[in-house]
Image: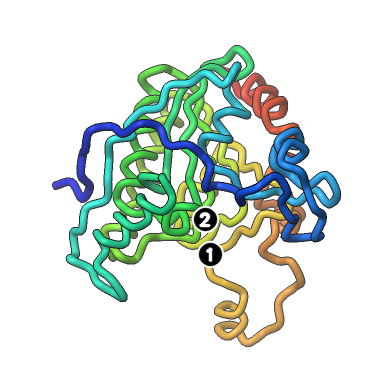
Amino acid sequence: MAWFKRVKPSIRPTDKRDMPEGLWWKCEKCGAMLHKKQLEDHFFTCSECDHHFRISPYKYFSILFDDDKYCEFDDQLRAADPLGFTDTKKYPDRVYDTIEKSGKTEACRNAHGISGGQPLVISAMDFGFIGGSMGSVVGEKIARAVDKSLELNAPLLIISQSGGARMMEGAFSLMQMAKTAARLTRLSERKLPYISLLTDPTMGGISASFAMLGDLNISEPKALIGFAGPRVIRDTIKRDLPEGFQRAEFLFDHGFLDRIIHRRDLKTELVSLLSMLKV
């Protein structure tokens, strides 16, 4: 039984709505006013404080694939409504409204191409679609990205950017944690590298499953990474928490991450890491 729908592939949407409109944008961290060209030249990071803006899968594809050439696959999958879920609105209406407003069709995009002269498969999540939440479609897309890596005998990069599981799908959403983790074992059996890139934010069931299972777990600077929010944890354990304990730098210092990489260096570092992981 499938908990997603297949539709005719749509035209690739533009990324106009991923970032603010206009020529000048304000850094949400330091308040610096940044020109659009300046931001693009710095890989959508602030030239004053190095704050990393959230970007879409297509922008990551453009940064990481040689000459911005790649082939997207499995873009025809859409969320179904296995539970007939309704909160302030019906789940299918929420999905439809998000597609209409954002131009995005799901919280994950898959593509394969060449990076640094090496074949690579990328599955990239998108916070701009219902908070990047993982439902049945996201789980299926990540599983198919693993299958594509096996088919092409190519490494896999998963870029996480999510608030966690999509609870409008209930247990079907939580099942994707086990599904994706189990599928990744096939890469290990074939000795194909899997690198997990954690970006801001990587929370909930994402951090509790595939995001932390990479042969190498890397992150962008200052990324928010964790399972539950700090208030929930503090109220549960009845203790004060270290400042910044859910930021990439804290996790790196405590052995949960292998490397923190600035976005301008991401492709160079990724190509180098994949070269080292070649069997």
Residue 161 appears in the figure: yes
Please state if 199 lies on the left or on the right of 107 as rendered: right
Please provide percent x and percent y for residue 133.
42, 56
Viewport quadrant of the C terminus: top right
Q: Is residue 81 above or below residue 237?
A: above
Establish if 171 lies above or below 44.
below
**Residue most toward the top?**
117
Judge from the rendering whether residue 30 lies leftward or rightward of residue 163; answer left or right: right
Q: CA distance from mark 1 to mark 2?
A: 6 Å
Q: Disc 1 or 2, which lies upstream in sequence?
A: 2
* Residue drawn at (67%, 48%) of the image: 257
The kind of residue tagged 1 is Phe
Q: Residues within 10 Å of mark 1 (few under 14, many from 20)?
A: some
Question: Which residue corresponds to the image point at 70% horizontal and 23% vertical from the top-left?
Answer: 272
Q: Amino acid at mark 2?
A: Ser
Q: Is residue 177 visible?
A: no
The quarter of the displayed image where residue 81 is located: bottom left
Residue identified by numbered label 2: 207
Residue at the farthest right position: 48
Residue at image coords 62%, 24%:
274
User: Measured along the vertical axis of the image, is residue 133 above or below residue 244?
Assistant: above
Can you tell which quarter of the image residue 230 is in?
Answer: bottom right
Q: Are marks 1 and 2 in contact (CB under 8 Å)?
A: yes
Checking the image for residue 227, the label placed there is 1
Element class at badge 1: loop
Q: Position of residue 36 (x, y in %)?
A: 71, 41
